Amino acid sequence: MIIVKVGGGEGINYDAVCDDIAQLWQEGQRLIFVHGGSHRTNQVAEALGHPPQFVTSPSGYTSRLTDRATLEIFQMVYCGQINKTLVERLQRRGVNAVGLSGVDGRIWQGPRKKVIKVVEDGRTRILRNNFTGKVTEVNRDFLQTLLDANCLPVLTPPAISFEGEAMNVDGDRAAAATAAAFQADELLILSNVPGVLRQFPDENSLISQLTADEIDHVSETFAEGRMRIKLLGAQEALTAGVRRVVLGDARGDQPILRALDGWGTVITPAQPEGAA
Amino acid sequence: MIIVKVGGGEGINYDAVCDDIAQLWQEGQRLIFVHGGSHRTNQVAEALGHPPQFVTSPSGYTSRLTDRATLEIFQMVYCGQINKTLVERLQRRGVNAVGLSGVDGRIWQGPRKKVIKVVEDGRTRILRNNFTGKVTEVNRDFLQTLLDANCLPVLTPPAISFEGEAMNVDGDRAAAATAAAFQADELLILSNVPGVLRQFPDENSLISQLTADEIDHVSETFAEGRMRIKLLGAQEALTAGVRRVVLGDARGDQPILRALDGWGTVITPAQPEGAA
């Protein structure tokens, strides 16, 4: 099983992504496709007069400030426009894709964080009415039912809280939780950078190999905001038994096939102690 | 099996709709829920600078002019905002709802009408690049797989063409095709009017009973634009073996339970010849 996450930044080559998925699927490879939609969401939120706001947590992670109005715009773009155009692209390539959010069938469930702490100008502030949370349970049975019916799941945030509220979750970490639930062979997290860069944004400074025990150091030393969350997702997946994570590039041709070939930052489990 | 279609006009009481669906579902009634989203789509299309346009066919039916940009806005609202907030409402009521468009798993398939004829100021014009079509095939097996997994399907346009393109279809007629595929006991088509009115918009002029063979006459004599399409859907469903269609009101309390009790315009199959 392969879990493919493709981010929603600017410059993603969705046609190439869907070409690769169709090829793998038709060769018999089972996979689940997870996508984002941040760039387009920002555009639509601006147009609808509710411009995006981003906040930074005390531990340094950046995320979208999600009130209820933002959540509904987010759903429009992620679950409506992007999810359905990806399903359409895959259907046109002969893949029986089925697009779902984490709310549907409670595919991604977890606790909602109603109140969050954010850092602004060096000061910590409390924000209420926050619709974000974390995926702690994946409805593997339902996803397996879809796969058994020869359907390719195309998944996107939001997820659902234990109380039944839609909530924004990080797509990379939701993909990691999905990979963990399936004990996947591969988790590919593709975006609009080549992988982890030693000197962001210098694309020639790619770190091509990492082991899980090096993630903390690399994350603190080199990674910028979005990449830190991807590294966290990679760490969570590897800890849970996923065999390999590749942080790769979805802007060019054959983005998935290349990631499987090891283009990008390839992260493998930590060497067992004493193995060297 | 009951198929419930709730339109997307102004004034729909979605909480009451979801209360009724949850009650029926928890009593063991199997059902499929189909929804619209036209009112909200018009608002979003205006806000995004692509205001809605409606066209009238030579046979007098009104529909949304759907170019590719309109289709994507339509998907945002129908598949994103409305579908997911309905799924969320149902999940919060303990129903394992799964929201899908007709594109997903090719649930609703049919021919696309790329070129349409429209009447403007009494003159017929040809429009190209049209993304509308008609549902002629329902993926009953996939819907049955979901029902067998104890999931309640929450369905919305668009549908998918035989060539794999997303296309706008009429939600009432898609619901009718779904009811036909399941040989449903009931098809409820609820909107923001009490049913078929003898003098539209006088809500005291409700026609409370009809047989299928009276539909053509009633449609030509009394019904306004949107109601004519609902009557066409009713006729298609009854012809295909559905036992009863109710055109009812979704603005008040208990809209589904009331429709099942016969509030609205109740349409039954034509009397067999010689039965009187």
Image (cartoon, coloured by chain):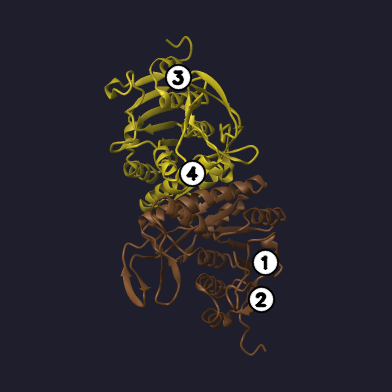
Chain colours: A brown, B yellow
Residue drawn at the location 37% of the way across and 36% of the way down: B9
Residue drawn at the location 61% of the way across and 88% of the way down: A273
Distance from the alpha carbon under mark 3 to that under mark 1: 59 Å
Judge depth for marks 3 and 4 and give the one in front: 4
User: Secondary structure under badge 3?
Assistant: helix
User: Secondary structure under badge 1?
Assistant: helix
Name the N-terminal-most of marks 3 and 4: 4
Q: Are marks 2 and 3 in contact (CB under 8 Å)?
A: no
Distance from the alpha carbon under mark 2 to that under mark 3: 69 Å
Figure check: B144 above or below B180: below
Q: Are marks 4 and 2 in contact (CB under 8 Å)?
A: no
Q: Are marks 1 and 4 in contact (CB under 8 Å)?
A: no
- The residue under label 2 is A208
The chain ID associated with circle 3 is B
Count how many numbered circles sit on residues in the image: 4
Q: Is residue B149 left or right of residue B16?
A: right
Q: Amino acid at mark 1?
A: Ala
Distance from the alpha carbon under mark 2 to that under mark 1: 11 Å
- The residue under label 1 is A259
Q: Nearer the viewer, residue B273 or B77?
A: B77
**Dot 3, crowdedness within 10 Å: few (<14), some or many (≥20)?**
many
**Dot 1, crowdedness within 10 Å: few (<14), some or many (≥20)?**
many
Figure check: A135 above or below B80: below
The chain ID associated with circle 2 is A
Quadrant of res B108: top right
Q: Nearer the viewer, residue A86 or B19?
A: A86
Residue drawn at the location 57% of the way across and 48% of the way down: A85
Q: Amino acid at mark 4?
A: Ile
